[in-house]
Image (cartoon, rainbow, N blue to C red):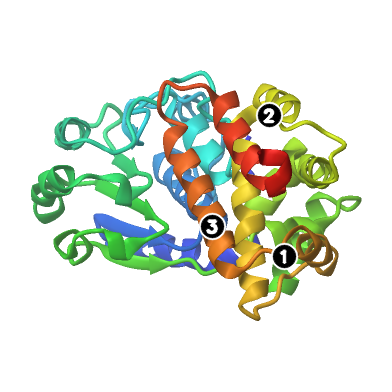
Amino acid sequence: MTQALPAWLCAPLDALRAQRDVGRLHHALLIHGPRGVGKALLAEHLIRGLFCKTPDAQGHACGECAPCKLYLAGNHPDARLVEPEIEHRQFAPYLHAIAQDDPDRKADTPRKQRLISIGQIRQLNEFLVTKSQFGGWRIGVIAPAEAMNVNAANSLLKTLEEPGGSTLLMLLSERPSALPATVRSRCRSLSIPAPAHAEAGAWLRSLHPQGDTEQALALSGGAPLAAAAMLDDGRLELHGQALSELEQLLRGRVEPISLAEQWSKVGAPIYIGFLQSWLVDMIRMHSGAGVPSAALARRLQALAQGLDLRELYRRLDAVSEARRLLDRSISLQALLEDLLLGWMPTPRRR
């Protein structure tokens, strides 16, 4: 079931629906904003309203007609999602997973391709000029749009310039500036900024009244959907446990190899992400910037004791390189071992 739309997304969705009602919905939308603010959720609600045969007065999908059921099942023939790793598999569930900021949405799919290729875009172009099976809209979504390589982006230009009737192409992006100017200029830009902290907190508490919503928001950089995902899947609790384990490692109470083995069984990408976020916060504190969570700041200050800015950046570079290597066929446990050994005091490393 599609998640209800948060208040900060209602106004942009209403504006898009109003444009559709008067026949002025642009054929190419560049929906951009920080990760976890709801870009994909907005796209999902718009798509459902366009496909539905009997939407209500506000344009909300009924969820009961044949197109709605096909979309919710991920089998709507007039929808196509293009991602770096997956091109069109179960459109609605995967788009919904992006909206939920789910890090495991493709856990069953090998990560072989990091960019969106020209072949994927060519297939999308071909799809968008075919006849709609329901006699209505043909909709394509590219997420994230900045994952297109140069040739792929150039291949999209003809479709952007000469769209077919009842065709909608949505490009979702966290970094619209990374897209070629030729692509950006042919799209109508729609910015989705992060909501105010109070609004995000109120929405998050309505979903998780017993959860540590302030901590989740702090760790997610104020992105409410990312914070909700942390509370949903237990990553917030895992984050606190991982920080405690790193503290135990530096006190000599845990061996790096055994901890790397433990972390790799749970999920190396999750822990590498934690290490990266901690180092970024340490660098921010070293440079005089604050960290939203005072409790986390105290613990990170203790972990960074004795480390200068150059060493913090060196460790951040090592973590960033480890994230890059996650797509390769190498031992994830070995990656974690190298990172954790790098955290050990020099005498112990020797």
Residue 248 is situated, as x and y percent measured from the top left of the image, at 85, 42
User: What number of labels is visible?
Assistant: 3
Residue for badge 2: 260
User: SS at mark 2?
Assistant: helix
Q: Three-letter amino acid code at disc 2?
A: Ala
Q: Three-letter amino acid code at disc 3?
A: Gln
Nearer to us in this view, 248 or 183: 248
Question: Picture quarter containing residue 201?
Answer: bottom right
The residue that appears at 35% across and 65% down in the rendered structure is: 19
| Image quarter of the N terminus | top right
- Disc nearer the start of the sequence (3/1): 3
Residue 146 is situated, as x and y percent measured from the top left of the image, at 31, 51
Label 2: few (<14), some or many (≥20) within 10 Å?
A: many
CA–CA distance in space, label 1 to label 2 = 24 Å
User: SS at mark 3?
Assistant: loop
Left or right for 97, reference 134: right
Residue for badge 3: 58
Disc ID at residue 324: none
Label 3: few (<14), some or many (≥20) within 10 Å?
A: few
| Image quarter of the C terminus | top right
User: SS at mark 1?
Assistant: loop
Nearer to us in this view, 78 or 273: 273
